[in-house]
Amino acid sequence: MIDEAAADGREEFRPLVELSAEERRQVVTLPTSIAKLTAVKHFVLYGSNIVRIPPEIGAMTSLEELTPYTSYRLHWFPYEITRCSQLVRSTVSTRALFGNYKLRPPFPQLQPPRVAVADLDLPALDARRRGTTAIRGCSVCDRPIKQRGLHQVWLSLRVATDVLPLLVNACSAACVAALPSGAEDHVQLPHTGGRVKQPPSDWD
């Protein structure tokens, strides 16, 4: 789907434009090779059927603008997007996001923390249980998860123009403790979802 050689030199990248409507409907995630798109400044996923973005988006070091607007199946983002230090503009359909200010939809309940992951197939996870299909490095310190544990939490932070619900795959309780506080008017502490108490919404 992504021709890295052609895309790497583009300032704006629209990976779904050349696909037919039927082909676009079949694309629900992006390949890990987006990490090679280090020169892309504007990433456009307008009107996509995407349900998740891989953590490798954090390697897109030149990214300044992200446009997944009207991608209504995209409910959360990987914490690694905070590594895109140049990202200053975003256009997101925020009402589709977990915990958004308008509607406060609940966050899915995450699995309990694990001090070891020897029995987990980290490159081939069940996204319904873990939120993602593969976990390689810690979202916080970048150390290999396979050598440590797995502590998954949600955290809502302002990223570029919007407050986004971020999935954190941490290797330890210490890395969870090192996370910043949540965005104003959102859950302040990292949490595992489920019955977490959220602040009042615009509709309360």
Image (tube, rainbow, N blue to C red):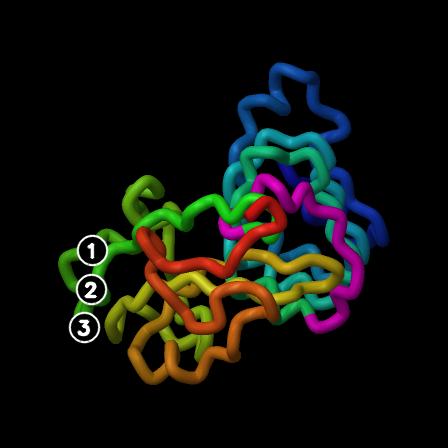
Q: Give the vertical position of 70 relative to 78 (above or below).
A: above
Disc 3, SS: loop
To which quarter of the image does residue 81 belong? bottom right
Q: Residue at x 32, y 74 (%)?
A: 171
**Which amino acid is tagged 2?**
Val
Q: Is residue 48 left or right of residue 90?
A: left
Is 20 contained in the magenta span? no
Magenta stretch, main secondary structure class? loop
Does 199 sit above or below residue 190? above
SS at mark 2? loop
* Magenta stretch contains residue 95: yes
Residue farthest to the front?
A: 204
In the figure, 133 relative to 80: above or below?
Answer: above
Report x, y in % for residue 101: 60, 53
Which residue is denoted by mark 1 in the rendering? 120
Q: Is residue 91 visible?
A: yes
Residue at point 48% right, 65% down?
A: 187
Q: Pick out the residue farthest to the right.
A: 11
The stretch of residues the image draws in magenta is: 85-99
The quarter of the rendered structure image containing the N terminus is top right
Badge 2 is on which residue? 117
Q: Residue at x 70, y 23 (%)?
A: 19
Task: Give the residue at x 78% y 65%.
Answer: 88
Crowdedness of circle 1 by 10 Å Cα count: few (<14), some, many (20+)?
A: few
Type of amino acid at the residue the image marks with label 1: Leu
State how far apart marks 1 and 3 are (Cα): 12 Å
Instruction: Specify the label residue 115 is tagged with.
Output: 3
Residue 25 image position (x, y, % from top left): 58, 22
CA gap between label 1 and label 2 equals: 5 Å
Q: Earlier in the sequence, mark 1 or mark 3?
A: 3
